[in-house]
Amino acid sequence: MNSPLYVAIDTPDLQKAEALARQVRNHVGGLKLGLEFFCANGHHGVHQMAKIGLPIFLDLKLHDIPNTVAKAVQALHPLEPAILTVHAAGGRAMLEDAKAAAGSHTKVVAVTVLTSLDDGDLLDIGVGGRAMDQVSRLADLAQSAGLDGIVCSGEEVGVARAAWPNGFFVVPGVRPAGGAMGDQKRAVTPREALDRGASILVVGRPISLAADPDLAARAIEATL
Ligand SMILES: O=C(O)c1cc(=O)[nH]c(=O)n1[C@@H]1O[C@H](COP(=O)(O)O)[C@@H](O)[C@H]1O
């Protein structure tokens, strides 16, 4: 079985990205490329990373009017990403049009509440109540709009999985026990996230900033 561990390759430097991916390739199930990488390297960079032979998770968190997002998703067809993110807050029509525009081999998943936000941060942007409730609301929306799954933290994935048994659940911001949180606020350990129902885990800095990234990836994999 492929590893559920996806490594976030968050760097604008293509050579560093390739080197990191090659170091960890035997102990991860896929490569997650996000805004930092894509803004610097675009389609060419994604094509280069795809040559490493692991599934590509393109994390662009698209969020705009439905027409713009659909056209952006169409423009990504040549990259054939295994997974693509959009923001659930873009609303039902945007989610439906994003899914309709995606290639048949691409899972479109909706980011619910960023793992860097807590209940207080949500209040700042006009969302009262708990992160858990907002994740549930947006997960229901994503499911009814025909998406493949959602992105949420390990704190919510159990409840979300129970409500959507065959959904695809991406859990980022996971941290090995005692690991540095950085800007993440709703983090659980990789093992906990998996036990609660995550389909895949996204881990960035605990691997990329380690003195030996392959050792760090292997140590995380050993806990799963
Ligand atoms: O969509 C994501 O992947 C994502 C959603 C979210 O809510 N939180 C989150 O951290 N991420 C991404 O997951 C990765 C986490 O990186 P680390 O905090 O370094 O492990 C980053 O690439 C983020 O862009």
Image (cartoon, rainbow, N blue to C red):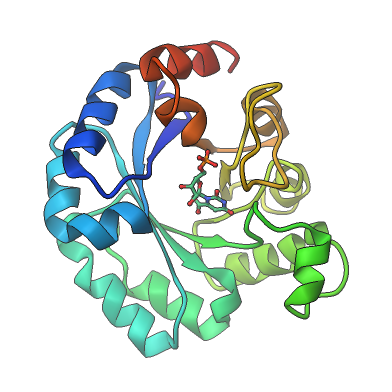
Counting from the top left corner in percent of width and height, residue 4 is at: 48, 29
Outermost residue to the right: 129
Query: Can residue 105 be seen in this snapshot?
Result: no
Q: Position of residue 56 (x, y in %)?
A: 29, 44
Point out residue 110 in the picture as x, y percentages from the top left corner: 53, 63
Q: Is residue 126 left or right of residue 65?
A: right
Q: Nearer the viewer, residue 178 or 167?
A: 178
User: Is 221 drawn above or below residue 154 in the view shown?
Assistant: above
Q: Quadrant of residue 135?
A: bottom right
User: With respect to residue 223, does 170 lie above or below?
Assistant: below
Position of the N terminus, as image quadrant, is top left
| Residue shown at the point (27%, 57%) measured from the top left | 38
Q: Is residue 45 above or below residue 221?
A: below
User: 121 or 141, which lies in front?
Assistant: 121
Q: Is residue 175 left or right of residue 22?
A: right
State the residue in front, 83 or 147: 83
Residue 58 x %, y %: 34, 53
- In the picture, the quarter occupied by the C terminus is top right
Q: Which residue: 11% across, 54% down? A: 44
Which residue is at the front of the view, 188 or 81? 188
Number of labels in the image equals 0
The image quadrant of residue 212 is: top left
Q: Residue at x 43, y 24 (%)?
A: 3
Is 66 positioned to the left or the right of 190 in the image?
left
Quadrant position of residue 213: top left
The residue drawn where x is 62% and y is 27% is 190
